């Protein structure tokens, strides 16, 4: 409908403009149409997938994706025996790509519900904690998705990283938080626990994106953290995921992850 309206506008303008003015109008309209189509392709995400170099659309069969991740693990396990540092670095990049480009796109638009715990994207509903624990489980981490999802945000973070290595920020503005996070972390995917919500934060070129099952939008979304109403909190608990060498190693060797008792 937007494209048709814009073309109609061109027809109206052509009746009273010179050739040069017509060329300018056509260029402006074509740019507007291109922008509109780009936004339509991205849907409500309104983010540029090419600029971010991440995939928004589900590709392939979900069960096949998760099965291949399990078989790929053996490669990194063998590589670790030859060069442990290189193997962990490669596994980190692999987990980043698989989570953001292969697994999560299948979950976009899955309905949110406070009690949702579906194990299948777009089939049922998913709460914020279950979205994180289930996608990590499907990424190949050896964990109990129910126990993780039912824990408080701080304890979920402690399952992924030791308490001493977590980053906790309280009573900060978004600008202050963004500055602190960028000083502490590099590009990657992180767990974040808020007052009453959890999700992933994607850091990409100093920008923060919030990926979560949103009780504000009633579905799984990715959005600029700065513009995300659900990202507002008095407390932020960050745990490293794709940049966490110890966690990545636990994935390689399928070590059991559990919430520490202390």
Image (tube, rainbow, N blue to C red):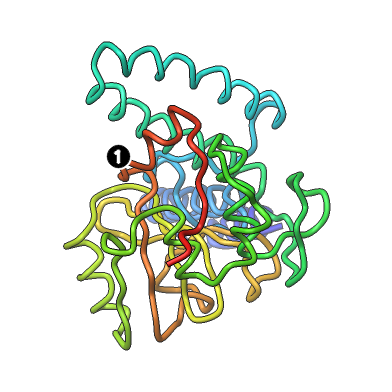
**Residue 103 point in image, percent of width and height:** 59, 39
Which of the image's four quarters has the C terminus?
bottom left
Residue at the limit of the structure toward the left, as seen here: 183
Residue 34 relative to residue 20: left or right: right
Residue at horizontal 69%, vertical 63%?
A: 219
* Residue closest to the eye, 51 or 225: 225
Question: Left or right of 105: which side holds 218?
Answer: right
Query: Would you place residue 160 above or below residue 247 in this image?
Result: below
Residue 222: x, y in percent? 53, 58
User: Farthest residue in the right direction?
Assistant: 124
- 82 and 182: which one is in front? 82
Give whichever of 100, 2 is nearer the camera.
Answer: 100
Who's the residue at 53% across and 39% down the image?
141
Q: Is mark 1 on a helix, strand or loop?
A: helix
Residue placed furthest toward the front: 261
Q: Residue 64 at what x, y percent from top left?
A: 69, 23
Residue 37 coordinates in the image, percent (x, y): 57, 48
Q: Is residue 210 above or below residue 114?
A: above
Residue depicted at 64% across the width and 66% down the height: 150
In which quadrant will I find the N terminus?
Answer: bottom right
Q: Is residue 226 above or below residue 94?
A: below
Q: Name the residue under label 1.
A: 245
Q: What crowding class fits label 1: few (fewer than 14 Cα within 10 Å), some (14-19), or many (20 or more)?
A: some
Residue occupying the point 16% across, 62% down: 183
Q: How many labels does the image show?
A: 1
């Amino acid at each position: 409908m937007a494209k048709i309206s814009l073309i109609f506008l061109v027809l109206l303008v052509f009746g009273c403009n010179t050739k040069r003015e017509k060329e300018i109008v056509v260029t402006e309209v074509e740019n507007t149409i291109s922008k509109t189509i780009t936004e339509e392709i991205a849907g409500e995400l309104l983010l540029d997938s090419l600029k971010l170099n991440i995939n928004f659309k589900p590709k392939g069969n979900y069960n096949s994706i998760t099965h291949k991740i399990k078989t790929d693990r053996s490669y990194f396990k063998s590589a670790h025996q030859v060069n442990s540092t290189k193997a962990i670095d490669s596994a980190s990049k692999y987990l980043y790509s698989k989570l953001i480009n292969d697994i999560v796109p299948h979950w976009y638009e899955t309905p949110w519900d406070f009690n949702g715990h579906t194990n299948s994207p777009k089939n049922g509903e998913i709460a914020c904690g279950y979205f994180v624990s289930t996608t990590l489980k499907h990424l190949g981490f050896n964990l109990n998705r129910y126990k993780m999802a039912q824990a408080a945000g701080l304890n979920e973070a402690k399952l992924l990283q030791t308490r001493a290595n977590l980053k906790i920020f309280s009573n900060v503005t978004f600008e202050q938080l963004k500055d602190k996070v960028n000083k502490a972390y590099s590009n990657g995917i992180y767990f974040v626990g808020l007052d009453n919500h959890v999700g992933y934060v994607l850091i990409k070129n100093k920008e923060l994106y919030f990926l979560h099952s949103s009780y504000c939008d009633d579905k799984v979304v990715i959005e600029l953290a700065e513009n995300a109403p659900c990202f507002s909190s008095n407390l932020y608990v960050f745990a490293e995921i794709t940049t966490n060498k110890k966690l990545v190693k636990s994935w390689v060797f399928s070590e059991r992850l559990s919430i520490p008792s202390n």
